[in-house]
Amino acid sequence: MPDGRDPLEGPTEKCGVVGVSLADRDAARPLYYSLYALQHRGQESAGIVTHDGFQQHDHVEMGLVGDAFDEDDIESLRGSAGIGHVRYPTAGSVDKSCAQPFTVSFKSGALGLSHNGNLVNAEEVRDQLAGKGHAFTSDGDTEVIAHDLARNLLEADLVRAVKRTMGRIHGSYSLTIMHDDTVLGARDPEGNRPLCIGKLDDGYVVASESAAIDTLDGELVRDVKPGELVVLRPDGEGFDSYQLFERENTAHCFFEHVYFARPDSVIDDNLVYEVRRELGRKLWDESGIDTDVVMPVPDSGRAFASGYAEAAQESGATVEFAEGMMKNRYVGRTFIMPTQDERERAVRLKLNPIKSTVEGKTVTLIDDSIVRGTTSTQLVQLLKDCGAAEVHMRIGAPPIVAPCYMGINMATREELIAADKSVEEIREAISADSLSYLSKDAVAEALDTDRLDLCMGCVTGEYPYDIDGEETDREVERPVVADAASADD
């Protein structure tokens, strides 16, 4: 989970995926380094699958990357092609049965698959496949994709098989796939989750974020396009592109830029750090207040606060940017808090104000979001207990009013404080002197994107996918799952 967020308070993103194809060296170590770079996207499990041209090798364990692998594990993963995965579960069980990459061996070869996202018709496809004799070992949606793809590979070549599977599954997905020693990357037709291509000295890589490519001293080539399949050549000499599906609009997840992604990653041609700074500037333009200091909730609010303070100073305000809270990086998401009193104390264990920055001052506190409101309430009280004269909260995203079905554990409507409360009611609940959120239009402007090309379901209640019981913000066609070969070849 990204830093600075109580696991019971904030949204958590499902996974990070990577695939590597090299010319003449083993892929395991570059995959291992890449997973470290993507660790913020998932901490429940980590895994790598490689292929040496003759057989598949895999190692998947629960826990952080550094705990899941040792030197012997890396040495045992032979082969110049491979895929990797880090998982934070939002669908399926929290055990090794859903850890990835998921592997299948069948008549047409060995298959490995890593998935970031969430299908909304997984049960429908699962039931159809089970009726045809497929036996499932997990309750996750990744196994559904793997079984469907394996079935299609019995009847079609690799590209047509992937197209058939993409034509049947509905929802959010970025995939890295390995069929024998061929590595592929695929992104859903709306491009909800990020995926990019990188060039190394001796091969190519596909990864959830460009930070993984940077870790390998590679060069970002471009994002995988929505609906595109890229096939890395086994010799490491390049890749082939197949535009399998096209949509009138994309559905890029705006929360990747607000919260999930590393600030140093480039996603859909936007450097995340600069997007967050621009969101902070727009936050000042829309609801700036001239206080003594502006400070971030570390670490996620830092870039927002930087942009906010810069815009404030350019307008003539006297507000000063300050690091007013220090974070204890050794209190992780597994910290045991059995009683309510201890849960309330947890925020003090994680964040401690700098008294000289806060005492007697009016403070603007910048955060990326308010989900349940628990942490925001505690932070406001913490600053006031430390002597702050006023605490004004500014949020670098619109109010979260609805759950996410695209692979984000965003809580239910009953748990979301903004689902049934006005901004003023939320301000009262968290005891802030004032509270303002960023507008939806400002988010689209900061990304230089039409709102219809973003997935903003969690802040609008209208989704870019057809989800039972929910409204959509566009015309959507559900895939037909009755016939495994129904997709256009």
Image: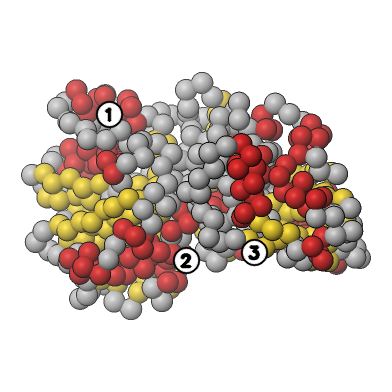
What residue is shown at x 27% (from left), y 35% (from top)? Answer: 138
Q: Which residue is mark 3?
A: 274
Q: Find numbered disc 1 in the image and state the secondary structure of the residue it sits on.
A: helix
Q: Which residue, as the protein is rendered here, is positioned at the far top? A: 469
x, y (%) of residue 29?
29, 70
Q: Which residue is mark 2?
A: 211
In which image quadrant can residue 451 be found? top right
Q: Earlier in the sequence, mark 1 or mark 2?
A: 1
Amino acid type, residue under disc 2 in the picture: Ala
Whether residue 289 is visible here, answered yes or no, is no
Residue 50 lies, with reference to residue 186, above or below; the image says below
Q: Which residue is mark 1?
A: 126
Which one is in front, 420 or 350?
A: 350
What residue is shown at x 67% (from left), y 32% (from top)? Answer: 417
x, y (%) of residue 63?
36, 53
Q: Earlier in the sequence, mark 1 or mark 3?
A: 1
Disc 2 versus disc 3: nearer the observer: 2
